[in-house]
Image (cartoon, rainbow, N blue to C red):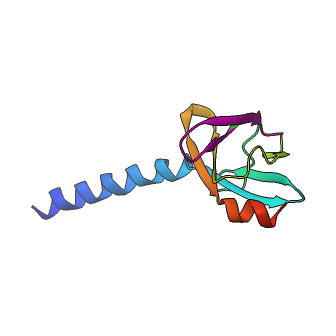
Amino acid sequence: MKKVVSLLLMLGLLGAVPALAHKVNLFAYVEGGRIYTESYFPDGRPIKQAVIKIYTADDLLLQQGVTDDEGLYACVIPRFVDLKLVVRASMGHQTSFVIKKAELEVGR
C-alpha cells in the first residue's frame, strides 16, 4: 500500500511541473491615457508576438494587437469602463488582467 501511495504522489508531482512551465503572466498599467502591458513566462522570457485582446466586462471585444519581441504592447485606452485584457501565448496558453474603470480615470 505504501508503494502505491508513494508512486501516486510521485506521478502527481511530475504532472505539476509541466503545468508551471506553460503558465503565462500578464501585467498592465495605465499612464498618460494609454494602457501598457508586459507579457512573460515564469522564467522571465517575454511572450513574443502574442495576441492581446481588450474586452469590456460583458465580453465585447474593443481592440486587439500583438506583443513585440520584448513581450510589450501599448495602446490608447479604448473606453473608460472596466476592461479585461487577455494574452494568448503559443499552444493556446492564456491569462487575463482586469483594469477597473477607476484605474483608467486616474491614468487619464
Q: Position of residue 36 (x, y in %)?
A: 81, 53
Residue 31 in the figure: left or right of residue 27 = right
Quarter holding the C terminus? bottom right
Residue 95 in the figure: left or right of residue 28 = left
Asked where in the image residue 30 lies, by quadrant, the reply is: bottom right
Identify the residue at horizontal 80%, vertical 48% (top origin): 77
Q: Position of residue 53 (x, y in %)?
A: 67, 38
Q: Answer yes or no: is residue 100 visible.
A: yes
In the displayed structure, 17 sits above or below 105; it is above
Q: Residue furthest left?
A: 1
Residue 69 counted in the magenta span = no
Residue 7 in the figure: left or right of residue 12 = left
Quarter holding the N terminus? bottom left
Q: Position of residue 69 (x, y in %)?
A: 83, 40
Provide the major secondary structure of the magenta segment: strand
In the displayed structure, 59 sits above or below 3; it is above
Q: Position of residue 67 (x, y in %)?
A: 78, 40
Identify the residue at horizontal 55%, vertical 33% (top origin): 92
Q: Answer yes or no: is residue 49 visible.
A: no
Count of picture labels: 0
Q: Which residues are magenta?
A: 53-68
Nearer to me, 48 or 80:
80
Nearer to me, 68 or 76:
76
Nearer to me, 42 or 83:
83
Identify the residue at horizontal 76%, vertical 39% (top origin): 48
